[in-house]
Amino acid sequence: MSPTARTVPTTSTTACAGRRAAGGRDWLERAEEALTAAGRRRGEARRAVLELLNNQACALTAIEIEDALRTQRRVSRASVYRILEELEELGLVQRVETGQAMVRYERVADQHEHHHHLVCGGCGVVMPFSDEGLERAISSLSERVPLTVSEHEIVLRGECRDCAA
Amino acid sequence: MSPTARTVPTTSTTACAGRRAAGGRDWLERAEEALTAAGRRRGEARRAVLELLNNQACALTAIEIEDALRTQRRVSRASVYRILEELEELGLVQRVETGQAMVRYERVADQHEHHHHLVCGGCGVVMPFSDEGLERAISSLSERVPLTVSEHEIVLRGECRDCAA
DNA sequence: CAGTATATAAGATCGAGTCTCGTTATTGTT
DNA sequence: AACAATAACGAGACTCGATCTTATATACTG
Ligand SMILES: [Zn+2]
Ligand SMILES: [Zn+2]
Ligand SMILES: [Zn+2]
Ligand SMILES: [Zn+2]
């Protein structure tokens, strides 16, 4: 019913998170370590959120996270948002602004996972992509701009193949 | 008080809307024509919104538009949103997602005005920029992606000079 | 100058996101 | 193992940008 991010292989020029949806162990470990290092205790709600995020190819909304967890372990909305904010501060999760109503969140890429997003205006599907040339253009540009650039976000909008057909 | 977009000259490599804030006549004319062609009547509320948008260097939020118009001609919030939606459908205005809470709107650039945005995480200021290399990278990439790309949006985040000081 | 359809204003309503606060769980200490 | 300290959590109230509803005003047509 509601448009959600799904796992779609990209035609991009470099590796992308989309490739290894339910798999990557390292992020989960890295996250747990970072949290311990930051002096945090281990709660079950956060553990559930971490596990869910680790199994996603791309970004989810807070509501999608709440719904997804409802079946196995009820996590309150406030906790979802608080946990996402904590993880964002620690650089483990990033917000994704797709131009749809809600903000999305995804685990932060190690170098090889860094990607951006395609959004279909028809069905709302969100797909990851990555491109070396684009990244080079961005980082070169970042030097010539009146701002100390720390992040960048790119969204391509259009119509996916299913909707175009 | 609240972070608003202000006119800031860019150091970019091409012309940008920021350069000719209160000036460009053609967009206003083009907009009026397009509206007439679409069979719309001429209301005062929309006229006020069009005039305001035409005098902006960069994107405003709906609330900023409502506030700006309050002094001269009260335009209701519903009208602001309805008018912006109409203009967006006609391709005269585009939404800008800066990753802040509210969506921003700006008049759609003719070719030479096309630009993207820098957002300061400190004070929330929004600045336009444009770059030829980046646009080339985007359009080349758009050919190799599983989506018929019709628009793109780029946001660079960081700290502006005032906030860094 | 009616008559008709669009445009607008005002306010109710919606919902994603935030905040408060009382309860529960984790961890370090005795 | 019992305890205290404090972080993590849940439930629900609340905020406010955005949308919807409806009555009124205004712009076009003949
Ligand atoms: Zn993604
Ligand atoms: Zn990138
Ligand atoms: Zn702009
Ligand atoms: Zn562009």
Image: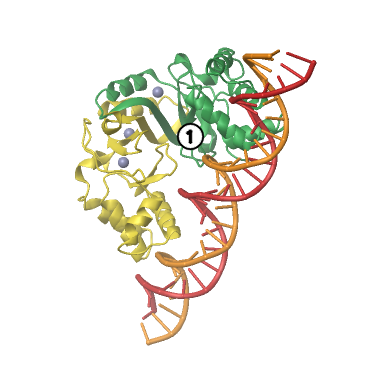
Chain colours: A green, B yellow, C orange, D red
Label 1 within 8 A of ligand 1 by Cβ: no
Of all chains, the one bearing label 1 is A
Amino acid at pointer 1: Val
Looking at the rendering, the quadrant in which ligand 3 lies is top left
Task: Pick whichever, A36 or A123, lies toward us.
Answer: A36
Q: How many marks?
A: 1
- Tell me where residue A71 appears, x and y as whole percent: 72, 32
**Quarter-of-image position of residue C27:** top right
Q: Nearer the viewer, residue A30 or C19?
A: C19
Any part of residue B42 in sight: no
- The image shows residue B89, relative to residue A84, as above or below, that is below
In-image side of C5 versus A47 (left or right)? left
Is C12 rendered above or below residue D29?
above
Residue B10: give x, y in percent of width and height.
23, 34
The residue at which mark 1 appears reads as A119
How many neighbours does mark 1 have within 10 angstroms: few (below 14), some (14-19), or many (20 or more)?
Answer: many
Between A135 and A110, the one nearer to me in the picture: A110
Residue ID at (51%, 21%): A92
Work out which quarter of the rendered image holds the C terminus of chain B and state it.
top left
Q: Is residue B132 above or below residue B39?
A: above
**Residue at x 53%, y 38% (from the top left corner):** A124
Image quadrant where residue B68 sits: bottom left
* Snapshot quadrant of residue A58: top right
B29 on left or right of D17: left
Residue B161 can be seen, yes or no: yes
Where's residue D16, x and y in %? 47, 49
How far across and how far down the image is residue B4, in percent?
33, 44
